[in-house]
Image (cartoon, grey):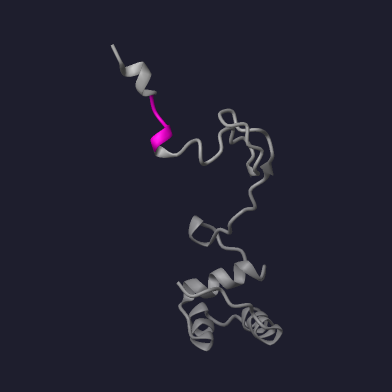
Amino acid sequence: MPPRSPLSRGDRDLLEFMLDNNYSYRSMARRFNCCSDTIKRILMREELAVFEGAKYSQQRQVETWKRPCLKCKAETPRPKWQYVCNDCKSPENSGVPDEFMKY
């Protein structure tokens, strides 16, 4: 996927004009050389239009905290309500300890 390029002020104004004059999403997409789904995502990102559905939803900023990890006590920032850091919850550290499995 190519990196997201910023929309120039002229392109934003053109999109706003096209939206106000009831241009179809397909014609907008043709003008910007992309698909109609990409145009809808751009319109959402620029807050020019709102579409229902997860396909066009935007990423929310995750609130973080510096609470100490329950296992290693590291205070690196991680998502709020995550009590164990990513290093401690890696696959090899998850599950039942080997000592518990011994008879």
Q: Give 13 or 84, whichever is nearer the viewer.
A: 84
Could you say where residue 74 lies in the image, as x and y percent from the top left? 63, 36
Q: Give 29 or 8, whichever is nearer the viewer.
A: 8
Q: Give 10 or 63, whichever is nearer the viewer.
A: 63
Report which quarter residue 79 is drawn in: top right
* Point 45% across, 78% down: residue: 35
* Point 65% across, 44% down: residue: 77
Q: Give 87 or 22, whichever is nearer the viewer.
A: 87
Q: Identify the residue at the far top of this view.
A: 103
* Point 32% across, 18% down: residue: 101
The correct choice, above or below, for 89 with respect to 52 in the image is above
Could you say where residue 32 lies in the image, as x and y percent from the top left? 53, 85
- Is residue 52 found left or right of 75 in the rendered image? left
**Most common secondary structure along the magenta stretch:** loop
- Which quarter of the rendering shows the N terminus? bottom left
The correct choice, above or below, for 15 with respect to 42 in the image is below
Q: Identify the residue at the far left of this view.
A: 103
Q: What are the residue bounds of the magenta stretch?
A: 92-96
Could you say where residue 46 lies in the image, as x and y percent from the top left? 66, 71
Could you say where residue 83 lies in the image, as x and y percent from the top left? 59, 32
Q: How many marks are shown on the rendered structure?
A: 0
- Which quarter of the rendering shows the C terminus? top left
* Point 65% across, 85% down: residue: 11
The correct choice, above or below, for 103 with respect to 8 in the image is above
Report which quarter residue 94 is drawn in: top left
Q: Is residue 66 magenta?
A: no
